[in-house]
Structures are given as structure tokens and as C-alpha cells.
Image (spheres, grey):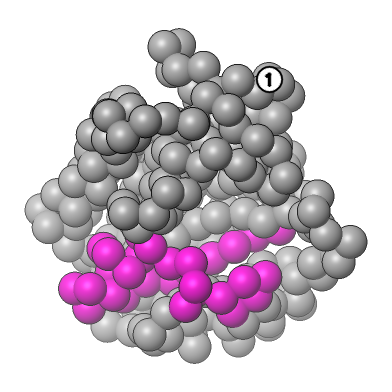
Amino acid sequence: MDFEAYRILGTPRFGGILVVSDHASNRVPDDIDLGISPDLLTQHIAVDIGVAQVGALMAQRPGTAAFQGYVSRLVCDFNRDEHLPTVVPIASDGHAIPGNALDHAGHEARLARFFRPYHDGLAALLADVPQALIVSLHSFTPQLASSDEPRPWHVGVLYNEDDRAARIAIPLLEAEGLCVGDQLPYSGRLLNATMNRHAEEDGRPYLGIEVRQDLIGHEQGQAEWAQRLARIANQVAVAIT
């Protein structure tokens, strides 16, 4: 099911697994001009590279569905608190986004068109079809353009106050021979808005996953990680219930 702000892949089932990807799309609606070079829309500032494909593959499995943002994070960043100006970013990783220099009415219109329908849709799904586990799926760059520091982790596990799923998942990922970041490449205590709202606030178990984008920027890696994350998510869901 496709809506302007989000799409749902697979069939959500009671007691299943829902893969939520806030930044799964680089789509910019035709009536919005961000004022940036088109090539920026293929970069991480516009989309979490690989997560749409990984989530779609996971959603092909019975009992798993995917809820994916359907516009670029440069149009509206769903993984932010509504009151923050970064919901409609005027800059990202050193790049100005001049088309987002909106007045109050324009900012409010962007929230009403994208941000609120996205979160209302996710809230309704979780209320109507309770899940055993939510997997928050993102990807991160091997190195930020604004930094010389490499990011060696294959995958990061993020959380805020609720680390139930993280404590189970980290050793499972390490057993795969992966370099696993615990609250790395950044902390879920600092950036966890969607899961804070839809999981932590209601006590729903969730697993925050960040995969390094070069590992899922191609079909082979996407298939490999979809299989791995589906297997581990199922193990976590069973262990946590």
C-alpha cells in the first residue's frame, strides 16, 4: 500500500515483526524544489542507501512487514521530533538546502503533508496489529563528508532507555563475525525519535539497526543482510516474549 508519506510492504500480522525505515526513499514530489544538485539525491544526506531493498526482502517473509518513508529525508525527516527545525533541514552534512528555507506557513504545510501522516499511519498500524518486535532499520556512511574519521563498524545497534532487544541482538551479530557498534556510530539516546514515540513510549520492544551502507549498496549485500537480519530479528522476538 502506497501513500504520499509512506508505504507498507507485506502483510502486517499480529505478533509479527515490523521493519520501520524512516529514510527509505529519495523521492522528491514534483511540486517541491529543494534547490540542490540532483546528484545529492543519490547520497546519504537524501536517503539511507540500501534499506528500502533490505526491508522489501525481509517483508517477503511470512510474519514480517515493512513500513517505509516514501519521501526523501531532505523533504521531511521523519526521525526527528516535530518541534525541531531539522524536521525540514536547511543544511545536511555541509550542503545547504535552499528550498527548505520556509516561512512558518510553509514549514507547517510540510509537516501536515508528510510528517504527521507518516507518524499517524505508523501509530495506527501498531495499534491495529500489535507486533512482537519493531526493527528500526537505517544505514550509515563509511565516513562522513565533513569528517576524516573512518567508521569501521559493519553494523550498529542503537537504543535509548529500553535496551532489551539490543542486549540480545549484539552477541548474535558478533557471532556472525561482524564488527558491532554498541551505541555506535552514534547514540540512540541522542537520535531515536521514531522509536521513542512509537516503541519506548508504549513499552513496545524494538531493535535499532544501522548497517554500513557500502555493505548493502548492491543486490548481493542486500540479500545477505535481509537474510541475516530476518533470522536475528526472529531470534530476538522469540527471546524477548
- What residue is shown with label 1? 38
> Does residue 117 sit above or below 113 in this rendering?
below
Q: At 69% from the left edge and 77% from the top edge, which residue is drawn?
A: 180
**Is label 1 in a helix, a strand or a loop?**
helix
Please tell me whether residue 188 belongs to the stretch shown in magenta.
Answer: yes
| Quarter of the picture holding the C terminus | bottom left
Q: At 39% from the left edge and 54% from the top edge, which residue is drawn?
A: 84
> Does residue 211 sit above or below 117 in this rendering?
below
For disc 1, the neighbor class at 10 Å (few under 14, some 14 to 19, many from 20) is few
| 136 or 27, nearer to the observer | 27
> Does residue 201 sit above or below 64 in this rendering?
below
For the magenta stretch, what is the residue range?
183-212
Q: Position of residue 31 (x, y in %)?
A: 41, 11
Q: At 60% from the left edge and 20% from the top edge, which residue is drawn?
A: 35
Q: In the drawing, does residue 199 fall left or right of residue 214?
A: left
Q: Which residue in the rendered view is the most extreme toward the left?
A: 128
Q: Within the image, what quadrant is residue 220 found in? A: top right
Instruction: Name the kind of residue labelled 1 in the image.
Output: Pro
Q: Position of residue 98 (x, y in %)?
A: 58, 28
Q: In the drawing, does residue 99 fall left or right of residue 160?
A: right
> Does residue 218 sit above or below 191 in this rendering?
above
Q: Position of residue 85 (x, y in %)?
A: 42, 49
Q: Within the image, what quadrant is residue 114 found in? A: top left
| Quarter of the picture holding the N terminus | top left
Please tell me whether residue 173 belongs to the stretch shown in magenta.
Answer: no
